[in-house]
Image (cartoon, rainbow, N blue to C red):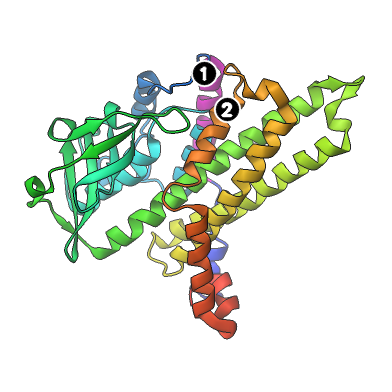
Amino acid sequence: MPDRSDALLVHSTTPDADLLSMLEGLFDDYRSRRPTPTEEVTFDAGLWAQLDELGLTRLTASEESGGSGATWVEGAALLGLAAAAGAPVPLAEHGVLGAWLLEEAGLPNDGALRTVCRPDPSGRALNVTYGRDASAVVALWEDGQRWRVADVPVERIELTEGRNFAGEPCETVQFDLADLVSAPVVDDSVGQQFHIRGALARSAQVCGAMERVLELVLAHAREREQFGRPIGRFQAVQHLVADIATESSLARAATDAAVARAAASSWQDPGMLFTVGVAKSCVGHAASVVVRGAHQVLGAIGTTLEHELHVLTKPILVRRSEYGSVQEWDETLAELAASAGRERLWPLILTGRR
């Protein structure tokens, strides 16, 4: 009989068929009616209302807390398809991370739009996505040897608006931590898991976007002609397309493995750090190849404001560095492998455990 680690490795990464069909139809429809892209991304309140009505904004939150009770398999599918459609909505921040933090802290969740952050000891948090559009910011911070969570209305914080490289709303937020001393204390595992949950959410988003980039590249290589034949017939272009497809597939395999382990163990498996680290590393390295290759294949048209490509490639470059840069995750994996030693390296690769 296979042990528990074997069961995790073969856990399905295929979401419910009806849900998947509904998500694909929803985001295909959104893509068909999406307005012409601009340099500045604006939160789509209409799309958010539609997602909320369908129970998708808190898909992975428990039913007891007002969520839909889905697993990370369904959650990752939602994040990937939304990213592939360039949907300007904070699904990861609001549902995957924010709703989870509120539930762990025993705080009520009225379903209003939220984003998340980890303020530093001074109460300052950088790169808080969609902060200007949220009704509250869910903050997780270290208070001495303890972790606390607070659901802070935007009226009680100082918010400086900004934008990231992708043009998305990305704010600097200042909290008065002295005003939050009564915030509930959460288990240490919440503080430790927040980073890797965020890393896996970003990996799922980047995978979805890269797969859409591959679709655009293939279509362009078939349709664009040069010297009397499609550019996809030229060997140099074929090499670029092959690189994009290979790296996207590797990133997807690594991410699916981490999602399967998270879903099967409810994030309790001790190998999650290594498995998510592999996913984040593969995704980060793939992002460079995919973005560079896609813009080479599409050439000038891919850099125009009207084309869909930059709606995908800019967020890819932003998200690969959130919740840990490629270098940071590479170093984490190297440390885990070195500490495992020669005798335990293969079990580490198979199970994520030293």
**Secondary structure found at label 1:** loop
Determine whether, in the image, residue 191 is placed left or right of residue 176. right
Q: Main secondary structure of the magenta part?
A: helix
Q: Residue 55's mark?
A: none
Depth check: give the residue in front, 6 or 236.
Answer: 236
Tell me: 171 left or right of 203: left
Residue 11: where, in percent of width, then height?
A: 53, 59
Mark 1: amino acid: Pro
Residue at mark 1:
37
According to the image, label 2 marks what residue? Answer: 310
Quadrant location of the N terminus? Answer: bottom right
The range drawn in magenta is 15-33
* Amino acid type for the residue under numbered disc 2: His
Q: Position of residue 7 (x, y in %)?
A: 53, 67
Disc nearer the start of the sequence (2/1): 1
Dividing the picture into quadrants, the one containing residue 25 is top right
Closer to the camera in the image, 295 or 311: 295
Q: Position of residue 293 (x, y in %)?
A: 70, 38
